[in-house]
Amino acid sequence: MKPLRNEDGIALVTSLLLTLISLTVMLAVLYLITQGIATSSAQKRYKNSLEAAHGGVEFFSKEIIPRLMQGDSAGTLTTAFSGINLAIPSSNCLSQKLNNSTAQWTACTGAVLTSDPKQSPDITFTLAGAGGSGNYKVYSKIVDATPGNSDSSGIDYLESGSGVTGTSSGVSPKHMPGMYRIEAAGEKEVNPNERALLSVLYAY
């Protein structure tokens, strides 16, 4: 007679189940490690693009706008900053953006009026990545403006500097700086998917 309870092979089944559980745990750990590396790499790429966008805003606000306000032409600036492949479209639009409110930008039409800095940007230039990691293309443009009474020479003639004890009979007008909303985008030159956008309010 054959026995009713036959436990032959139970050890094999148990070992297979333990192997399956161990394999599942190992795959889960490997997946978490892989995802962590991918997330870290994505954050690093985004940080590099964001730094390029910051550079675009700094360069546009600290170099380009003051020099255009002081009378430098687009051609002069393009030549002065040829090392970064600076490009400034030759049109009256940028001049109107610097000197007029948004509603008075009659020379600006179509994509120039959008908030996307890649569509008809005011300036574009190239920044070299750190450690030979590749170049970054930077796009920047003014999308909104409220002109003020700042002197375009770069010298503040609005403040007398005499303070409350001054004896000057003149009245100094209140300084109302021009306000510009600047949009900037920094992206990897060889991979436009690695990009970051930046929006800032600049007072001149």
Image (cartoon, helix red, strand yellow):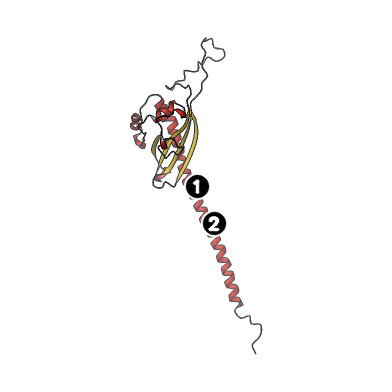
Q: Provide the residue designation for mark 1.
A: 43
Q: In which quarter of the image is residue 76?
A: top left
**Mark 1 Cα-neighbour bin, 10 Å: few <14, some 14–19, many ≥20:** few
CB within 8 Å, label 1 to label 2: no
**Left/right of residue 74 with respect to residue 58 in the rendered view:** left
Pick whichever, 94 or 196, lies toward us.
94
Residue 67 x/y as whole percent: 40, 27
Q: Determine the secondary structure under disc 1.
A: helix
Q: Residue furthest bottom?
A: 1
Quarter assignment of residue 74: top left
Residue 30 placement (x, y as % from top left): 53, 59
Residue 89 is left or right of residue 48, and the answer is left
Q: Which residue lies furthest to the right in this view?
A: 4
Q: Marks 1/2: CA distance? A: 16 Å
Image x and y of residue 90, in percent: 35, 32
Q: Which mark is first along the chain, 2 or 1?
A: 2
Relative to 186, residue 148 above or below: above
Q: Residue at x 43, y 43 (%)?
A: 187
Residue drawn at point x = 47 percent, y = 40 percent: 197
Hey, what amino acid is under mark 2? Answer: Leu
The residue carrying mark 2 is 32
- 94 up-or-down from 24: above or below: above
Q: Within 10 Å of the Cα at label 2, are there few (<14), some (14-19), or many (20+) other Cα atoms?
A: few
